[in-house]
Image (spheres, helix red, strand yellow):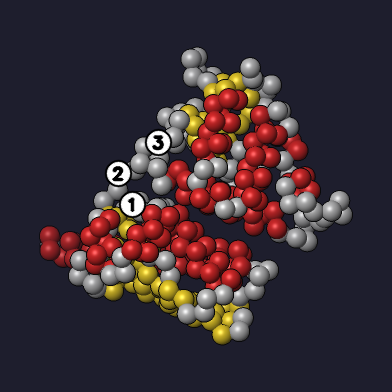
């Protein structure tokens, strides 16, 4: 049996363990409802485990996963990168939604299509038995003890069309993942939020049910192919609006995933700057009080 073994004796992963983890991942609704994500992940895992990591390029993925013709040109079409971004977000969502760590951690680092396999508590590098190296992160701990619990409520939208529905769900999932970059936040899984919001509509009740201190909510409006998004962060206990922003742009079926990336990046950058300004004010107040 081929194995993936780190340079520490007694700590190894077998192909069987990795394929079993793949089966668990495919039971998640994000993968159950997306044949492309399942095919994408299956293909890159198969190729990596059989020593073909060098074949995991945009061109080969386009032909084998997305059924593109042999004249496909990656430099002119970003479809592989778009679906790779969706795959990374889906994997992040899967692992972050678990109450207990999974036995095997599978990820796809930015800038690469070669999957990384590691034990949840691995702090070393993993190596394929045939000599292909696969680098794991230094710490794959999934559950992080953070002080403030944040919940992203599915955005409200007026037009019940396919594009708006995709944008609404995509933004919620991606924003939930991106908010985890803030050290002060623990983010409730977006899939959980969707289920809760189908039963409870009052923000205060949602926050109480999930133990959330902060709520991120928003509204999407569209006219033709133009859209406008209003987003705000609310203190769940005081109903105070702590931060808000408004974004607008053009929405088409060709740019929807790229648009999601741009919107979330803009929101996170704005929120990060607001947080820094708030920290500075707190520090200034503290210094004044001491003086």
- Residue at mark 1 to residue at mark 2: CA–CA distance: 7 Å
- The quadrant of the image that shows the N terminus is top right
* 3 vs 1, front mark: 3
Q: Is residue 23 visible?
A: yes
The 10 Å Cα crowd at callout 3, few under 14, some 14 to 19, many 20 or more, is some
Res. 281 visible in picture = no
Q: What's the mark number on residue 186?
A: 1
Crowd around label 2: few <14 · some 14–19 · many ≥20 (10 Å): few
Residue 145's disc is: 2
Q: Residue furthest right?
A: 71
Residue located beneath label 3 in the image: 101
Number of residues whose C-alpha sits closer than 10 Å to that of mark 1, classed few (under 14), some (14–19) or many (20 or more)? many
Front of the two marks 3 and 2: 3
In the image, residue 134 sits, relative to residue 69, either above or below, namely above
Q: Which one is earlier in the sequence, the residue at label 3 or at label 2? A: 3
| Residue displayed at 28% across by 68% down | 203
Q: Secondary structure at mark 2?
A: loop
Residue 174 x %, y %: 49, 59
Q: Quadrant of residue 6?
A: top right
Residue visible at 74% across and 35% down in the picture: 54
Furthest-bottom residue in this view: 223
The one nearer the camera, 192 or 5, is: 192
Q: Nearer the viewer, residue 144 or 266?
A: 144
x then y, percent, for residue 239: 23, 72
Q: Residue furthest top?
A: 9
């Amino acid at each position: 049996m081929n194995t993936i073994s780190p340079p520490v004796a007694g700590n190894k992963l077998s192909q069987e363990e990795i394929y079993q983890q793949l089966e668990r991942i495919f039971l998640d609704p994000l993968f159950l409802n997306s044949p492309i994500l399942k095919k994408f992940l299956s293909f890159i895992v198969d190729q990596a485990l059989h020593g073909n990591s060098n074949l995991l390029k945009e061109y080969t993925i386009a032909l084998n996963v997305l059924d593109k013709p042999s004249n496909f040109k990656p430099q002119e079409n970003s479809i592989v990168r778009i679906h790779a971004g969706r795959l990374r977000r889906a994997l992040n969502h899967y692992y972050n939604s678990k109450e207990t760590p999974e036995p095997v951690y599978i990820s796809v680092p930015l800038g690469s299509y070669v999957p990384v396999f590691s034990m949840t508590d691995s702090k070393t590098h993993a190596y394929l038995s045939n000599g292909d190296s696969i680098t794991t992160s230094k710490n794959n701990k999934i559950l992080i003890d953070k002080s403030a619990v944040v919940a992203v409520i599915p955005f409200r939208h007026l037009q019940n069309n396919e594009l708006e529905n995709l944008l609404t769900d995509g933004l919620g999932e991606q924003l939930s993942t991106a908010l985890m970059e803030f050290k002060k936040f623990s983010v409730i899984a977006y899939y959980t939020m969707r289920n809760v919001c189908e039963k409870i509509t009052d923000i205060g009740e949602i926050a109480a049910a999930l133990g959330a201190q902060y709520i991120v909510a928003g509204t999407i409006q569209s006219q033709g192919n133009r859209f406008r998004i209003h987003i705000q962060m609310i203190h769940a206990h005081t109903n105070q609006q702590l931060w808000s922003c408004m974004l607008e742009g053009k929405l088409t079926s060709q740019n929807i995933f790229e648009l999601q990336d741009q919107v979330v990046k803009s929101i996170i950058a704005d929120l990060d700057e607001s947080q820094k300004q708030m920290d500075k004010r707190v520090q200034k107040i503290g210094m004044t009080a001491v003086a």
